[in-house]
Image: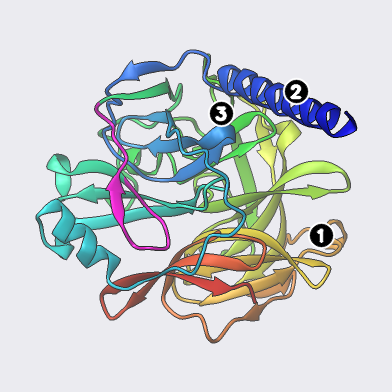
Amino acid sequence: MNALRLSIAFSRLAALLCFVSALALAANTVGFKAGKAELKSAGALAFAPDGILLIGDSMGGSVFALDTGDRTKSTKGGSFDIKGINQKIAAMLGTTPDQVLINDVIVNPISKKAYISLSRGSGPDAVPMILRTDASGKLEEVPLANVKHASIGLADAPDAAAKDNRGNSKRMEAITDLGYVDGNVIVAGLSNEEFSSTLRSIPFPFNSASKGAGIEIFHGAHGRFETNAPVRTFVPYQIQNKTHLLAAYTCTPLVKIPVSELKPGAKVKGTTIAELGNRNKPLDMIVYKKDGREFILMANSSRGVMKLPTEKLESYESITAKTDKQGVPYETIASLKGVQQLDKLDDLNALMLTDDAGSLDLRSVPLP
């Protein structure tokens, strides 16, 4: 009798959990509709709860949310070792590797599958696509023609014809990174405002998007305050029980920015807590734990992969004078070469896209 009652109790608990999960999914997909997701570009990626994929569409000046339906839980991502994934993608699409531009790679934290945003072709005729794969290396296209999705246009995206002082399109940097933070989608990039470096906090599910907050930082390598350089990559982090963004910029200041200050139209001054070396572009960042401590792992264009401790981030004084290197210490992981993208795969491993003489390899690596 006790066994029967226990079985009934477990069945009821399972049913309740399914019901709660269904309610949560319904709440996170309010306003979603089935149909074609009209992406003009596919850049930065992030995941919201329940396998909802967020896609930055800089050319379209929009953020998309796709219900991938990818909700089969996996605690470990397996061992990725996919050599020449750019060549495999090109073969799948019936083209050549030079016509495939991979823009971002992230891991679905539920299924541990890797999602890849890319452009097939170049110029105005480039076709945005999303692919996914697991450790087996089997690639599949995430459908965009008929998918439950929602989108929100940015209220302050740069004009499509706007150019920077090097002649590059500002619209292409309308979205440089994005992430789901405490019920909001944080979007980094450029705007059409005077403080063109912008962080936008958009409530999720999407309803409306206001203007972002203009961001000012002191750039130690340049010895001046800047308002027009966009955040390249960021991670959320708790500092003294308050959510901050740890944001990295070209050349490579590391800045902390309180999320609570990201109000529409606000002018926010970030606190520069490290200068990690100039002539460098940060590419990707993750936070992880190892041996009871927390670290930041940052991939860079010319300064390798850096490992930074997160202890006492509140204690570093704001950098307000010209300097090359100062603030939060770091070590360079010599064994990690050519890393273009990285994300946390599980508690022990990172997933990395690495460039080996033109061959792009997707592999899992133990967290250092």
Measuring from the top left, give residue 295's x and y in whole percent: 72, 66
Q: On the image, which quarter does residue 338 sit in?
A: bottom left
Most common SS among magenta residues? loop
Residue 141 colored in magenta in the image: yes
Q: Amino acid at mark 1?
A: Leu
The magenta span reads 131-145
Q: Quadrant of the N terminus?
A: top right
Q: Nearer the viewer, mark 3 or mark 1?
A: 1
- Is residue 187 at all visible to an observer of this figure? no
**Distance of mark 3 from mark 2, alpha carbons?**
46 Å
Q: Nearer the viewer, mark 3 or mark 2?
A: 2
Measuring from the top left, give residue 166's x and y in whole percent: 30, 54
With 262 as the anchor, is 12 left or right in this view? right
Task: State the mark number for residue 212.
Answer: 3
**Distance of mark 3 from mark 1, alpha carbons?**
26 Å
Q: Are marks 3 and 1 in contact (CB under 8 Å)?
A: no
Residue sitting at x 73%, y 75%: 329
Q: Residue furthest bottom?
A: 334
- Is residue 72 at all visible to an observer of this figure? yes
Q: Quadrant of the C terminus?
A: bottom right
The foreground one among 42 and 29 is 29
Question: Helix, strand or loop at disc 1?
Answer: helix
Q: Residues within 10 Å of mark 1 (few under 14, many from 20)?
A: some
Task: State the mark number for residue 78.
Answer: none
Q: Amino acid at mark 2?
A: Arg
The foreground one among 125 and 248 is 125
Where does label 1 land, which residue? 313
